[in-house]
Image (cartoon, rainbow, N blue to C red):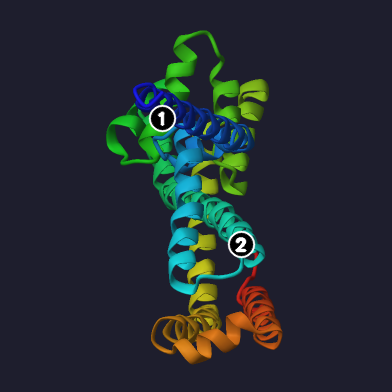
Amino acid sequence: MSGATPFILLGVAGAVVLGCIAFWNNLVAWVAVKMEPSRVLLERAAIPIKAEELAMIVIGIAVIPWILLLALIKPQPALGVLMLVGTSVMAFVGTRGYIEHRIAKRLQQFSNQLEVVLRLITGAMRVGLGLRQALLQVVSDMADPARIEFSRVLSQTQIGVSIYDALDQLSERMPSGELTMMTRSIRLNGATGGNLGKVLENLAETIKQRRKLNRKIAALTAEAKFTKYIISALPIGVGAFIMVFEPDMRAGLVGTLLGRICLAVVVGLIALGWVWFGALSRLDV
């Protein structure tokens, strides 16, 4: 019997390892399904990873802080489960927020390039080039993300997609009112005829004036935005200091009902302040 014990232990260990691997694979697959709608967002944000890889990153962001908190606070099992739920929610929300930030930054870069793109197209048409040749000029002269996006437009035209449909798909990938005006103007001009170069030149001038107005708005709302970041960061920094360097206060906040209520109220007030200052600093033109 004693001679068979190592084999039994080895079999049990193997079964545990296989069970952990199966659980991990199922967990990754489940999160990947939930992250499937993010494929389009990842492409729009120009983040070169798959949904499965994003799922593993989200799981890591959720689990690692949870383990650190368990080692630091040593909570009761019920509180430990709630902490796992909290870190998981923060991982999902934080990852989604980062992707949306990347999308917004890329869309802003593309919008800033759009005036130059229109002037390049207008200049190419003035010397007798067609729309496709003008877009080739854009690809050769512009930096990313305009170069990549218009390269996709030209690649689609090479496999049989009309240039108007390819531009409409570009407008879906890079949603912008100015780009929508550009694509609709090109399609309408293709159907009715006219001086497309003049139309795009007028649109470029309109975009230029909008940029000036947006810069003025950004200067006027900068104080509210800066205040939002400062007010949100202060309680988070104080809370982190207490959790690390003040064990008695940490025990009072985390280990008592009143402390947990205070923490919940603080989190709610931070979120409310973030939304409020965001509304004050937002002005659409």
Residue at 58%, 88% (x, y): give it: 252
Q: Residue at x 39, y 46 (%)?
A: 116
Q: Earlier in the sequence, mark 1 or mark 2?
A: 1
Residue shown at the point (57%, 30%) measured from the top left: 26
The crowding category of the residue bearing disc 1, from other C-alpha atoms within 10 Å (few below 14, some 14 to 19, many at least 20), is: few
State the residue at coordinates (44%, 35%): 53
Q: Which mark is residue 86?
A: 2
Circle 1/circle 2 CB separation < 8 Å: no
Q: Amino acid at mark 1?
A: Leu
Q: Is residue 37 above or below residue 7?
A: below
Which residue is more in the foreground, 272 or 130? 272
Q: Position of residue 16 (x, y in %)?
A: 48, 32
Is 195 placed left or right of 191 in the picture? left
Quarter of the image that includes the N terminus: top left
Q: Observer-nearest residue: 57 or 274? A: 57
Q: Is residue 131 visible?
A: no
Q: Position of residue 59 (x, y in %)?
A: 50, 46
Q: Is residue 68 left or right of residue 221?
A: left
Give the amino acid at mark 2: Gly
Look at the numbered disc 1 and give the secondary structure of its residue. helix
Q: Which residue is denoted by mark 1 in the rendering?
A: 9
Q: How far is disc 1 from disc 2 in space, using C-alphas?
A: 37 Å
Tell me where residue 179 sits by quadrant: top right
| Mark 2 element type | helix
